Amino acid sequence: MKKMYLQSSTSKIRVMKNLKSSGLLLPVMPVILVLFICVATIAGGQSTPNRALLALSKANHTLAIVDPGTLKVITTIPVGEDPHELVASADGKTAYVCIYGGGSFHEINVIDLVAQKPLLNIDTRPLYGPHDITFNSGKVWFTAEGSKAIGRYDPAAGKLDWSMGTGQDRTHMIYITDDGKKIYTTNISSGTVSIFTDTLIKPGQMAPPGAKPREEWMHTIVATARGSEGFDVSPDGKELWTAASESGTITIIDLVTKKQAAQIDAKVNGANRVKFTPDGKLAFISSLQSGELTIYDIKSRKEVKRLKPGRGAAGILMDPVGNRAFVACSPDNYIAIVDLKTLEITGQLTVGGVPDGLAWAVRP
């Protein structure tokens, strides 16, 4: 058997030499090489899914792209020194990351989610401390905490095209209605919520000839409690809930009357974020101080349950498709997963050290 094997091997070598000397082998090798490279490339990298979970790591200075089906990290992309919040464009192809620096930095990173690489850095000066960010009507809107303002970036023009001062201390989080006509922000140190309403102003009797109607953002300030940071707007657009880290209270604002409707002594000290469930029935409140996740019933305004996902709970992202919530447990270096039906913790996801900002990127 050994002799037969040697004879067989020798025959193969002889045939290969004959092919090479005759020139028949040369055209075959490049084809084989190309096929090998193609297979290696496909096996070595994964494309971004049409629906991707985005998560920031403050410690690693990275943006992780996660497959929400498998909960596997597809890739991580470098971002700036102190990333806090992020958003994806409406087409799901681009991410915008706020580089905060405690209110002193002035940068927003733009990331290509398809090519999985950084694109450019937006210099937000004279607006400092970009912290929270959203995408509406083709433009990027963000808070500028260090400048007591909100700003807007136009990706098509490649420049900042609008800003508005709040006159409040530590303007931190932002929400814009779908029609783009109302903007809400929390102002942490002032203990207030700013409500900006896009209003059409018609020229008065004293207006000069030829004066035309113009738009003006009317500003209403509603008192909440010092330390009011995380907030959310109910799916029906009628209420805004915000929790105060210092007093542990929840302030509810009636968005129709633009007045405080109620204040609950919820004892959620260290409150960081507030998020409504997709059905609008429950509110999740995270605490960096206690690590608890407090769940409230919206209708009865009563506490339903408290979970302990880790030593500190921060960013919250709802998943209407998977009936779950992702809660960034920053001190624990993981993201906890909560089942929205059972209200139980079902797992963990690791995207890097000190996770915080979370967002969805959905391509049609």
Image: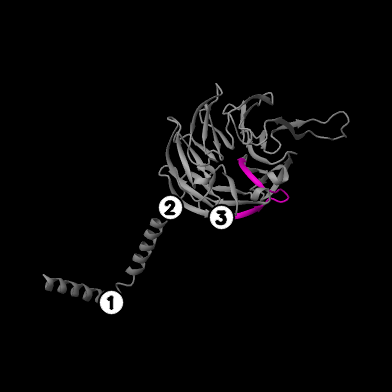
Mark toward the viewer: 3 or 1 = 3
Eyeballing the image, is 30 above or below 230?
Answer: below
Q: Earlier in the sequence, mark 2 or mark 1?
A: 1
Which of the 4 quarters of the picture holds residue 269? top right
- Element on which disc 3 rests: strand
Horizontal placement of 85 versus 26: left or right? right
Find residue 209 and name its label: none
Magenta-tinted stretch: 117-135
Type of amino acid at the residue the image marks with label 2: Gln
Q: Amino acid at mark 1?
A: Ser
Which residue corresponds to mark 3?
118
The quadrant in which residue 26 appears is bottom left
Q: Are marks 2 and 3 in contact (CB under 8 Å)?
A: no
Residue denoted by label 2: 46
- The amino acid at mark 3 is Pro
Query: Above or below — where is 356 with respect to 27?
Result: above
Residue in the image at 38% along x and 64% along y: 34
Q: CA separation, marks 3 and 1?
A: 50 Å
Mark sitting on residue 22: 1
Q: Nearer the viewer, residue 35 or 73?
A: 73
Residue 222 included in the magenta stretch of the image? no
The N terminus: image quadrant: bottom left
Q: Is residue 147 left or right of residue 282?
A: right
The x and y percentages for residue 271 are 59, 36
Can residue 172 be spotted in the picture?
A: yes
**Local crowd at mark 2 within 10 Å, few (<14), some, or many (≥20)?**
few
Q: Does residue 116 appear anywhere in the picture? A: no
Picture coordinates of residue 145, whole percent (x, y): 69, 44
Magenta residue check for 133: yes
